[in-house]
């Protein structure tokens, strides 16, 4: 059963009930109007009585107010997120409601925290959710890969619920510890407009070594000129390029840049802006990257540096259950390709298994070779080692090679569940840029955003199938864990709950008395996610779980 919510011009809410008709198709079974003030209790009753899928235009627009009223829902259909999947997917060629150009259903998600009283604010109200929902269901049900696509859109929508719930509960954060960590790394908090003491010390060393007493280290152009004048011939101030040179200025400059990144990304200004009442509430953007990975629109939760993770401190009487999916993307490649030799290698530590296969000599080489295979490295150490993997694991290497060739030809590749890659022609400026934005083309492997050619796009599609399917696995993992937590303890304030997600890692805040039980559920959920995607295929998805008092203890 589906209940669709639509906001009316007068502020009330129209609720449309959909049920299966005699033909098996969804049909409107009833429509009613609910006063805005009565929405939360009405949703709570319907959730209890029917456990439906709630259908709405944008989860951040509806769900925060329900959570504020103490109402949690188990399932939803986020029309905007599903629209984005179906509009691009090769599995739904008949879905054309978006047209050849982006339409109103392609707008960004509502900005968390911006409210007009009941609903989260979006740039424009999305039109006709009833028609959009019907079109989406028809497209999914007509798809030749309906089963997989159903799982994808359900997982994507569940991810939207989880993102809002995590922001609502927040990550437990200690401002006192954060300040202590910053002081240790940078020096005491400076006056406004000044640099911290340790940064000033490093800057003085750089200026002396370069003979540039007035150097502004935060100006890349000025810094490159000063380095070149001192005989350090660089074209940029990227870390990997600076590290190639030996000069007295390099070490303090790298030290300064590291401190500068910390100060800008998670310094005292960040602390003042983002931590309130002992909680950091990041703005997650599910599906914010073309591969399906999440992004953030504020707070930088997906780039949380190790230097401040000690500030993530469990409440008194609570613990943090931190789980990391080991070697996720190589294992996803194993499942996608059905490579039994790689599956055997991954029975334990995958990289050690690759060494035992005779493909490479060390675990470090195994990791470099695998990254090179998934990211398309053809030079250096990775380029030398990848052919060895191809001889030992031909099915896995053939899969990424085929994806690369498709991309080079301007074609589209798909994740396991049916998310499709963009074509270069979709955005003439996207070749290279999309891959870098998706984390699929690391610049240290010699791929530049400006390298807009077919080979660059092939590198992107090579990794798209792996990274995108890994994102699907992670959504299924979180969804399974959320369902288990709610089934065991409910969604009350004193129940264990997800508070953080980072691509292949989750953190649950749990009462100390049940933390070990939560750890078991985390592992069971990873097994379930693997089964949902790959059935009985011989690929394992082990997770490393730690029960700790603060996040830094898990590393």
Image (spheres, helix red, strand yellow):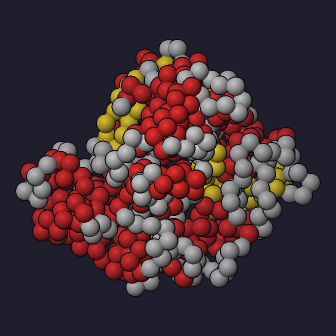
Residue found at x 49% / y 37%: 208
Q: Along the line of sight, which residue is nearer the eye, 408 or 529?
A: 408
Whether residue 201 is visible here, answered yes or no, is yes
Tell me residue 58's x, y (percent): 69, 56
Whether residue 51 is visible here, answered yes or no, is no
- Which residue ends up furthest to the bottom in the rendered image? 409
Tell me residue 234's x, y (percent): 44, 58
Count of numbered marks:
0
Left or right? Give the position of 6 relative to 474. Answer: right
Left or right? Give the position of 247 relative to 200. Answer: left
Among the 4 quarters of the image, the one containing residue 513: top left
Question: Can you say whether 297 is above or below 28 in the image?
Answer: above
Q: Along the line of sight, which residue is nearer the eye, 292 or 371?
A: 371
Left or right? Give the position of 90 relative to 124. Answer: left
- Which residue ends up furthest to the right in the rendered image? 10
Residue found at x 57% / y 75%: 429
Q: Along the line of sight, which residue is nearer the eye, 264 or 234?
A: 234
Among the 4 quarters of the image, the one containing residue 464: bottom left
Tell me residue 369's x, y (percent): 22, 59
Tell me residue 314's x, y (percent): 50, 22
Residue found at x 92% / y 54%: 10
The C terminus sits in image quarter: top left
The N terminus sits in image quarter: bottom right
Q: Along the line of sight, which residue is nearer the eye, 79 or 455?
A: 455
Among the 4 quarters of the image, the one containing residue 72: top right
Residue found at x 63% / y 57%: 78
């Amino acid at each position: 059963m589906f209940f669709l919510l639509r906001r009316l011009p007068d502020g009330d809410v129209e609720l449309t009930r959909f049920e299966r008709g005699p033909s098996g198709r969804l049909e409107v079974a009833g429509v009613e109007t609910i006063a805005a003030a009565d929405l939360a209790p009405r949703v709570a009753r319907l959730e209890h009585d029917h456990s439906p899928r709630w259908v709405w235009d944008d989860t951040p627009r509806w769900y925060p107010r329900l959570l504020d009223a103490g109402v949690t829902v188990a399932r939803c259909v986020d029309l905007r997120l599903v629209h984005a999947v179906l509009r691009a997917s090769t599995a739904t060629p008949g879905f054309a409601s978006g047209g050849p150009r982006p339409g109103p259903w392609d707008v960004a998600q509502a900005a968390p925290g911006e409210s007009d009283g009941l609903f989260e604010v979006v740039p424009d109200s999305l039109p006709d959710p009833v028609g959009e929902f019907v079109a989406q269901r028809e497209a999914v049900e007509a798809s030749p890969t309906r089963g997989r696509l159903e799982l994808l859109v359900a997982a994507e929508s569940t991810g939207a619920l989880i993102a809002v719930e995590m922001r609502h509960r927040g990550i437990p954060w200690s401002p006192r510890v954060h300040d202590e960590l910053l002081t240790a790394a940078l020096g005491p908090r400076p006056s406004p407009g000044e640099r911290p003491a340790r940064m000033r010390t490093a800057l003085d060393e750089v200026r002396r070594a370069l003979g540039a007493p007035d150097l502004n280290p935060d100006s890349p152009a000025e810094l490159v000129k000063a380095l070149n004048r001192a005989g350090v011939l660089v074209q940029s101030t990227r870390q990997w390029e600076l590290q190639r040179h030996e000069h007295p200025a390099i070490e303090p400059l790298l030290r300064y840049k590291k401190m500068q990144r910390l100060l800008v990304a998670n310094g005292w200004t960040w602390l003042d802006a983002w931590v309130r009442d002992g909680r950091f509430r990041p703005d997650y953007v599910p599906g914010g990257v073309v591969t399906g990975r999440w992004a953030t629109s504020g707070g930088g939760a997906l780039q949380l540096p190790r230097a401040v993770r000690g500030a993530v401190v469990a409440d008194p009487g609570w613990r943090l259950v931190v789980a990391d999916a080991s070697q996720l993307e190589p294992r996803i490649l194993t499942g996608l390709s059905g490579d039994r030799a790689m599956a055997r290698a991954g029975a334990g530590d995958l990289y050690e298994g690759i060494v035992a296969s005779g493909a490479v000599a060390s675990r470090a080489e195994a990791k470099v070779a695998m990254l090179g295979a998934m990211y398309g490295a053809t030079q250096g150490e990775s380029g030398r080692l990848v052919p060895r993997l191809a001889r030992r694991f031909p099915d896995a290497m053939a899969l990424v090679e085929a994806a690369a060739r498709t991309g080079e030809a301007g074609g589209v590749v798909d994740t396991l569940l049916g998310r499709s890659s963009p074509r270069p022609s979709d955005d003439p400026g996207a070749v290279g840029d999309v891959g870098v934005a998706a984390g699929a083309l690391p610049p240290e492997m010699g791929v530049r955003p400006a390298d807009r050619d077919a080979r660059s796009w092939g590198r992107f599609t090579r990794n798209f199938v792996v990274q995108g399917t890994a994102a699907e696995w992670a959504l299924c993992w979180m969804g399974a864990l959320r369902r288990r937590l709610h089934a065991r303890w409910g969604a009350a304030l004193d129940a264990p709950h997800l508070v953080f997600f980072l691509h292949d890692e989750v953190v649950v805040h749990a009462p100390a008395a049940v933390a070990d039980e939560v750890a078991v559920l985390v592992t069971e959920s990873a097994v379930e996610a693997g089964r949902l995607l790959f059935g009985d295929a011989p690929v394992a998805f082990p997770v490393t779980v730690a029960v700790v008092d603060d996040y830094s203890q898990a590393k």
